[in-house]
Image (cartoon, rainbow, N blue to C red):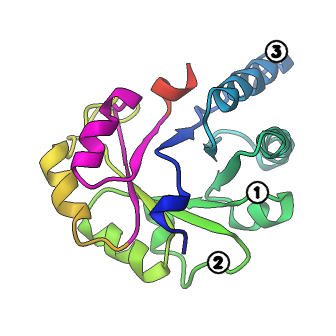
Amino acid sequence: MFSHLALPSLVLVTPDLPFPYSPKQQARFLSTLEKAVKNGICLVELRLKSLPEALYGEIAKAVISLCHAKGCKILLNGHRKKAFILGADGVHLTSEQLFLQKECPKEVQLLSASCHNEKELKRAEELGVDFAMLGPVLKTKSHPGVSPLGWKTFQDLIEPVPFPVYAIGGLAPAHLPRVWQAGGQGIAAIRSLWS
């Protein structure tokens, strides 16, 4: 298990690539990712949910190569076997996948999970995750119909948790002092860290 001291305060979650996509869109995706890493991002979750498996592998290889060349760690969203085969640093489990896993995957260095409530945080603890992302803390365009947790609930939920927790949902680097005040590790974000 990673110490909170070994984890950064920002995690970039990539946006999805539309499918079908053009070579130009792929080049723009990789260029934007490279800028983010050059600007100090050192932990990335590759979240490409709409791509077919064959294309996913192609993009994932390029992303892993780019991140590793810059000293950045990369997690693949939900792709346990692919993470090991492609050389990613770890896997990020969705809240649904948390309950499908019987044990912590041994072949990955880093394991993280999406959580939205106490039950999911407890399951993440049982699996021995290195860290979790809890939210949405604020309103977010990516989950328009979901009620945000708010800061008090976020703080109450993470207080008994023995692993680092990132706040996610409608957040930007300017929210870091508030996250730290609540006891969080930092923020995970798409829009505010990608643009």
Q: Is residue 87 left or right of residue 192?
A: right
Q: Which residue is mark 1?
A: 88
- Callout 3 secondary element: helix
The residue positioned 78% from the left and 49% from the top of the image is 53
Q: In the orientation shown, which residue stands out farthest toward the top? A: 24
The residue positioned 28% from the left and 38% from the top of the image is 177
Image quadrant in which you'd find residue 60? top right
Q: In the orientation shown, which residue stands out farthest toward the front? A: 5
Residue count near mark 1 (Cα–Cα under 10 Å), binned few <14, some 14–19, many ≥20 = many
Q: Which residue is mark 3?
A: 24
The reply to whether dot 3 and dot 2 touch (C-beta < 8 Å) is no
Q: Specify which label sits upstream in the sequence, 1 or 3.
A: 3
- Callout 1 secondary element: loop
* Nearest to the observer: residue 151 or residue 42: 42
Which of the two discs, 1 and 3, sits closer to the camera? 1
User: What residue type is disc 1 on?
Assistant: Ala
The reply to whether dot 1 and dot 2 touch (C-beta < 8 Å) is no
The image's mark for residue 105 is 2
Magenta residues, start to end: 163-189
125 up-or-down from 18: above or below = below
Q: In the orientation shown, which residue stands out farthest toward the left? A: 152
Quadrant housing the C terminus? top right
185 up-or-down from 3: above or below = above
Q: CA distance from mark 3 to mark 2?
A: 35 Å
Q: CA distance from mark 1 to mark 2?
A: 13 Å
The residue positioned 49% from the left and 60% from the top of the image is 5
User: What residue type is disc 2 on?
Assistant: Pro
Residue 9 at what x, y percent from top left?
Answer: 46, 45
Q: CA distance from mark 1 to mark 3?
A: 24 Å
Quadrant housing the N terminus? bottom right
Q: Specify which label sits upstream in the sequence, 3 or 2.
A: 3
- Callout 2 secondary element: loop
